[in-house]
Image (spheres, grey):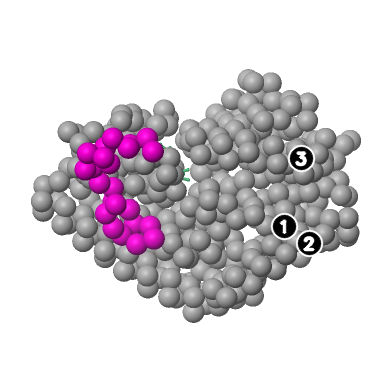
Amino acid sequence: MKKFLDLGLQPLANSYLDGKDINKKEKKFRLEVAFNPKNYLVSILNTVSKEKMFNENYPYKSSESLTMRKAFKQFSTKIKKRFKPNSILEIGSNDGTFLKNFSKKNIVGVEPCKNLARITKKKGYRTFSEYWNQKLAKKITKTNKVDLIYSANTLSHIKNFSEIFKAINLSLNEKGILILEDPSLLECIKKTAYDQFYCEHIYVFSSISLQKILDKYNLEIFDIENTSTHGGSNRYFIKRKLNNFLKITKNVSKNFKIERKNGLHKLSTYKKFAKKVLISKIKLNKIFDNLISQQKKIIGYGATAKSCTVLNYCKIKKTSIKFFYDTTSFKINKYLPGTKIKIKKYKKLTIKDVDYVFLGAWNFRNEIFKKEREFIKNGGKFITHVPYPRIL
Ligand code: TYD
């Protein structure tokens, strides 16, 4: 493992603080990122136990965003058309934003965060509130293996993926299909989006690294779709190597080629990326210093896990951002970890209240800009750090 980036001491990204805990010492860990030249895998070096991150206080709900609701709905329709699965298993079903597009008798959810699993259980969906592993795989698919397994933004959160793939191999039909969806390393590098790294994002995958992992479990990618969700993601369609019924599409070699052309198999690429990250930090601080010297009122929009990395790495002061707006009920009236900036219930932006808005949820820029048309028309401005720090 070759370390190439140090994002400093960081709190747990989704550990939003209650007012009463604001003066308590927070648990911090050193966020360092490394590259493995053998399998091209990029991962964080110091990890936090899954029980500390994925428990019954998990705040992230995919249904909070229109973009995600639409993306899951559209993809569900595509799955039904292309693969016609009779049985589906979703690993990391969150609050059911994907699940609910299928009939209750055809789909099973696995979601270790009890607060989220409760939501789908209540709606009548068979949901197992446990971590995905071989034991659970045997329990769920004891008599019937499944035609399709889907997992979005979950594999990148799990340290021991050996257990994951062994469990998948136990549950999937011989001709079954596995679909994985996670942020794209290529997009992360291109956009200098270093905030894709935080405690929960143990890995940011490239297709070349994922295929190296899959080789060990006799699985292979037969198609790839590049999507815009979460700042640029890849959707990998995977089959057993022995299954010759499905042909490998040109998209696979195309993605492998583009990633190699961009040097994702070389350490030098990541060293260059680390230099860009440092410049990004300096530039973002300059923007904040400049606006604060002009006494501009700055707030944040979208108290994301990603913002946690940015604010703590760049050491943005608590006084620089008055508060964050967020739509997630669980986050409201809490404080961002580390910087301890307050999170308030979302209200439409007006130029009377705010001058500049730091775009914490930059991955939802289009959705947000549509919502805040009036504010923008009246001269309201946004600050972003992606792909480089600037005012929009
Ligand atoms: P997201 O970027 O998906 O996640 P992460 O925490 O993994 O970095 O989180 C988006 C956050 O932004 C979520 O807390 C909801 C919030 N949000 C708003 O407050 N308003 C909006 O219009 C949108 C799209 C998101």
Mark 3 sits near ligand 1, with its Cβ under 8 Å away:
no
Task: Name the residue located 49 percent from the left edge and 35 percent from the top edge.
Answer: 66
Q: Residue furthest left?
A: 294
Task: Name the amino acid type tagged 2.
Answer: Ile
- Which of the two residues, 4 or 101, is positioned nearer the viewer here? 101
Q: Is residue 382 magenta?
A: yes
The relative height of residue 56 versus residue 287 in the rendered view (above or below) is above
Sequence order check: which comes first, mark 1 or mark 3?
3
Q: Separation of disc 3 and disc 2 at Cα?
A: 19 Å
The stretch in magenta equals 370-392
**Residue 249: which quarter of the image?**
bottom right
Q: Separation of disc 1 and disc 3 at Cα?
A: 16 Å
Task: Name the amino acid type tagged 3.
Answer: Lys
Q: Mark 2 = which residue?
A: 248
Which mark, by number, is residue 81? 3
Q: Is residue 125 left or right of residue 302?
A: right
Task: Name the residue located 59 percent from the left edge and 70 percent from the top edge.
Answer: 259
Q: Is residue 199 left or right of residue 94?
A: left
Measured as percent of width and height from the top left, residue 373 is found at 32, 37
